[in-house]
Image (cartoon, rainbow, N blue to C red):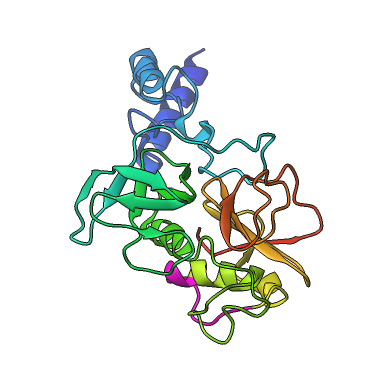
């Protein structure tokens, strides 16, 4: 008994001299010189006994790319970002296919700086009388991309449109995608649908996803689809438009701007 006590004492002295242990072991729930009191403190610090480092990581927000519904109508609050940067409630009047605001507007199908930069609360883009309102929670690049897409809504489909120059009387599928990306400062030169197969990063993006192959390209942005094809769109209108998400996107290479 005396030998064991002496050995125990020597062992304790060696541990204290060589490897001092703090009173609370960094959130692991471990116990050191503080005994049971330290254990209770560590347990409270780690949220009920589970190590904080093992808490499940929150998945980043990712905008949807498919939908079971073609209904994209929106009737909630809409705001407009003025040239001064001020955000004010938006008031529109829809007549003869036109969208007008209290600060002056332009008809769909006309590239004009007078088209309003629309905003809505939350993370999802909303369909407002033919145009897309950008989510307030989105990065500025996404908001500018959406507002750029609005500028060509309603223009005709023209094969090769938007490739010789970003300015064109009409746009094809990849020209539409290129124009919107350029508006968000994410592309400097127009690309065709084949070139988009190696654009940015692979897979679905957080905010923007591009679907492309040798024959067609379109993109989804914050829950809306910008496309020249009327596939899965009850409006059956051709040319660059905001449309419902498709129920599936088979047959396409999936890319997204890096980081978005």
Which residue occupies the foreground of this view, 4 or 194? 194
* Residue 41 found in image quarter: top left
* Residue 230 found in image quarter: bottom right
Image-based side of 226 in relation to 99, left or right: right
- The chief SS type of the magenta part is loop
Residue 210 visible: no
**In the rendered structure, which segment of residues is drawn in magenta?**
182-191
* Residue 239 found in image quarter: bottom right
Relative height, residue 25 to residue 87 (above, below): above
Q: Position of residue 247 (x, y in %)?
A: 73, 42
x 49%, y 64%: residue: 109
x 59%, y 68%: residue: 156
Image-based side of 39 in relation to 154, left or right: left
Q: Position of residue 168 (x, y in %)?
A: 52, 79
Which residue occupies the foreground of this view, 64 or 225? 225
x 55%, y 45%: residue: 223
Please check the rendered image and state whether residue 111 is part of the magenta-colored stretch, yes or no.
Answer: no
Image-based side of 182 in relation to 252, left or right: left
Q: Position of residue 158 (x, y in %)?
A: 64, 75
Relative height, residue 131 to residue 122 (above, below): below
Q: Position of residue 189 (x, y in %)?
A: 53, 82
């Amino acid at each position: 008994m005396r030998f064991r006590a002496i050995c125990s004492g020597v062992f304790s002295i060696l541990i204290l001299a060589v490897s001092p242990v703090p009173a609370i072991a960094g959130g692991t729930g471990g116990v050191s010189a503080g005994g049971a009191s330290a254990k209770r403190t560590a347990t409270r610090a780690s949220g009920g006994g589970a190590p904080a480092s093992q808490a499940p990581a929150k998945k980043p927000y990712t905008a949807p790319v498919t939908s079971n519904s073609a209904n994209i109508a929106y009737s909630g609050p809409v705001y407009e970002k003025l040239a001064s940067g001020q955000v004010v409630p938006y008031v529109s009047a829809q007549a003869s296919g036109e969208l007008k605001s209290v600060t002056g507007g332009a008809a769909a199908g006309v590239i004009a700086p007078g088209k309003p930069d629309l905003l809505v609360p939350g993370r999802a883009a909303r369909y407002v009388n033919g145009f897309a309102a950008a989510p307030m929670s989105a990065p500025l690049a996404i908001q500018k991309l959406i507002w750029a897409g609005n500028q060509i809504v309603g223009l005709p489909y023209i094969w090769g449109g938007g490739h010789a120059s970003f300015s064109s009387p009409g746009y094809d599928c990849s020209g539409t995608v290129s124009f919107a990306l350029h508006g968000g400062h994410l592309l400097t030169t127009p690309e065709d649908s084949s070139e988009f197969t190696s654009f940015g990063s692979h897979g679905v993006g957080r905010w923007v996803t591009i679907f492309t192959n040798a024959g067609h390209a379109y993109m989804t942005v914050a829950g809306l689809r910008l496309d020249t094809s009327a596939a899965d769109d009850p409006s059956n209108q051709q040319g660059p438009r905001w449309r419902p998400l498709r129920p599936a996107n088979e047959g396409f290479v999936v890319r997204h701007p890096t980081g978005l």
